[in-house]
Amino acid sequence: MTDQPQAPAVLDGLPALLPGLADLYRDLHAHPELSFEETRTAAEVARRARACGYDVTEGVGRTGVVATLDNGPGPTVLLRADFDALPVRERTGLDYASKTDGVMHACGHDMHVACLLGTLRLLADARAHWSGRIVAVFQPAEEIAQGARAMLDDGFLDRFGRPDVVLGQHVAPLPAGTVGWHAGPAFAAADSLRVVLHGKGSHGSRPETAIDPVVMAAATVLRLQTVVAREVPGGETAVLTVGALQAGTKANIIPDRAELKLNIRTYGGDTRARVLAAVERIVRAEAAASGAERDPEITEIDSFPVLTNDETATARTMTALRTALGPDRVFDMGPVTGSEDVGLFATDSGAPICYWMFGGLDPEQVAAAQKAGTADRDVPANHSPFFAPLVDPTLTTGVTALTTAALEWLAD
């Protein structure tokens, strides 16, 4: 074995892999599966990882898959990809669009799987160029913030060992061929809440006999919009979104309840506590102002912690990626308000984490939208029914970045 890994030599095999990885990506995209229902995806991942020579364990944290490869003394490097889809009806018009109505890989997790499997094949074929242990994690249920915790609670660290570093990546609406990173707090905490407002039903012609939960909900939604604008300091970051409002069945019936679903993004600490307290105060106050005879119900749907990239690990990893991809293609994107649960593998194990974004969209489309000042409107983002990463160079960049990062840490 050599003392240092040779990334260019290892990556020489990538062009031959790309057609098969592209076919895999299209197949996964056409067959999306919701959180903790990823049985077809998990089976395909397990089959391919075994074919690369990895020891594979299925059913970790319900539907998760872990593939390990021991190759002499050295660090343990955890590489992670998530693989659940979203309840979104696809509108891309692609010939490999989702075949499951109302379910779509709208966040790019299918691309994550294809890139990680490509990396596993390259590393397995180039054992002479590295030493150490690879632990590849194919995680379920990231979209509901339960998959990482489920795998950890299933004895992950005892069964597969504590990593020396946690590495991973997420495809994003950046120009394909680029990598965006940020050290320190990089991905926001997210809290999703369900709010049930209780009113009193009646006929639509006699509102005076009702306590209208629709009006109560409307007032609550409007008042909640003041939290960020009027209760969060200007130097802090917070986002509050009411993503669902459901009430009633018929135009002339006043229902007896309304339900809201809220999503809150912060970087934790005092701001998170301030926003959550304000939400509860407003919800209860609007119910009281409407004369509600029952207190509203506020329950947690899911919660993501802040993902904090280790500064030393990030600097080391990005130095390697700049060498592999070119310095003009690897940039500090600043913190993002998206959220991720991959950080739990780091916090539970005590290992440093480096998690980055890689671009998936047509560079000319992105540049034109940015020049016109319409990027927020014209560039499909994750969770959009139109989000569809280019197959390549997205795959090339994702596999190159993940393989290079793994080799950088396996060098010790």
Image (cartoon, rainbow, N blue to C red):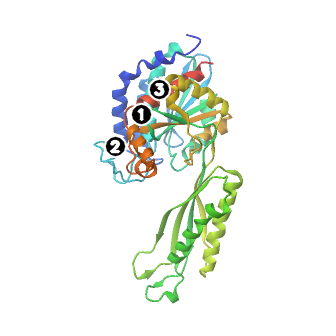
Label placed on residue 394: 1
What residue type is disc 1 on? Thr
Q: Quadrant of the C terminus?
A: top right
Of residues 199 and 182, which is closer to you in this image?
A: 182
Which residue has dot 2 on it?
Answer: 30
Which of disc 3 and disc 1 is earlier in sequence? Answer: 1
Which image quadrant for residue 319?
top right
- Dot 1 falls on a residue whose secondary structure is helix
- What is the crowding at mark 1: few (fewer than 14 residues within 10 Å), some, or many (at least 20)? many
For label 3, the SS is helix
In front: mark 1 or mark 2? Answer: 1
Please determine whether, in this image, residue 77 is positioned above or below residue 3: below
Residue at horizontal 47 percent and vertical 26 percent from the top: 400
Q: Residue at x 53, y 72 (%)?
A: 217
- Mark 2 lies on a secondary structure that is helix
Q: Earlier in the sequence, mark 1 or mark 2?
A: 2
Graded by Cα atoms within 10 Å as few (under 14), some (14 to 19) or many (20 or more), the crowding at tag 3 reads many
Looking at the image, residue 402 lies above or below residue 412: below
Quarter of the rendering occupied by the N terminus: top right
Badge 2: residue crowd in 10 Å (few <14, some 14–19, many ≥20): many
Q: Nearer the viewer, residue 262 or 257?
A: 262
Whether residue 68 is visible: no
Q: Amino acid at mark 3?
A: Thr
Residue at label 3? 400
| Mark number, residue 273 | none
Query: Which callout, 3 or 2, points at the residue further toward the start of the chain?
Result: 2
- Label 1, label 3: how far apart the Cα atoms are: 10 Å
Give the percent coordinates (x, y) of residue 308. 64, 40
| Disc 2 residue type (three-letter) | Ala
Question: Do we see residue 236 in this rendering?
Answer: yes
- Residue farthest to the front, as pictured: 371
Where residue 353 appears, as percent x and y from the top left, is 62, 34
